[in-house]
Image (cartoon, rainbow, N blue to C red):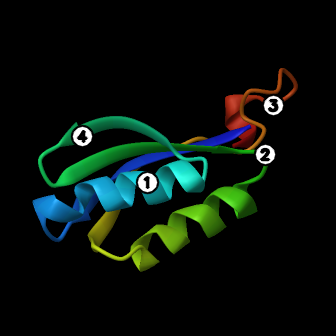
């Protein structure tokens, strides 16, 4: 499982609910709403799926900016991978 977290800056406070609804449709978890910022979490099976979903967030009507705060490395939780190989 690959995880990415970040936040969306919204153009106007009145557009927050619209963006929240769009994130729910896309099966993206909402962790916090702070005025015009929405903190999200994307969990997908592959890095490609996370990247595709993350990049599409900027196309949501009302989204001013999208910021990535954290992402996991695919396979990093496998017992056979050592940190020196990452």
Rendered position, 10 above or below 21:
below
Which residue is painted at 36% across and 60% down in the image?
A: 19
Q: Relative to the observer, which residue lies in front, 14 or 75?
A: 14
- Foreground label between 1 and 3: 1
Q: CA distance from mark 1 to mark 3?
A: 38 Å
Q: Residue 62 location, x and y as percent?
A: 28, 73
* Quarter of the C terminus within the rendering: top right
Which numbered circle lies on residue 33?
4
- Foreground label between 3 and 4: 4
Q: Which callout, 3 or 2, points at the residue further toward the start of the chain? A: 2
Q: Secondary structure at mark 1?
A: helix
Task: Evaluate whether residue 70 shows in this view.
Answer: no
Which numbered circle lies on residue 8?
none
Q: Which callout, 2 or 1, points at the residue further toward the start of the chain? A: 1
Callout 1 crowding tier (Cα within 10 Å): few <14, some 14–19, many ≥20:
few
| Residue farthest toward the right in the current orientation of the protein | 80
Which residue is painted at 17% across and 71% down in the image?
A: 11
- Foreground label between 4 and 2: 4
- Foreground label between 4 and 1: 1
Rendered position, 44 above or below 19:
above
Q: CA distance from mark 2 to mark 1?
A: 23 Å
Task: Evaluate whether residue 20 shows in this view.
Answer: yes
């Amino acid at each position: 499982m690959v995880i990415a977290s970040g936040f969306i800056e919204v153009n106007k406070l009145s557009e927050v609910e619209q963006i929240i609804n769009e994130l729910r449709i896309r099966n993206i978890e909402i962790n916090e709403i702070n005025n015009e910022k929405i903190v999200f979490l994307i969990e997908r099976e592959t890095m490609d799926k996370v990247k595709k979903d993350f990049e599409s967030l900027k196309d949501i009507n009302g989204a001013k900016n999208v910021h990535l705060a954290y992402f996991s490395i695919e396979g990093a939780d496998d017992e056979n991978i050592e940190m020196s190989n990452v």
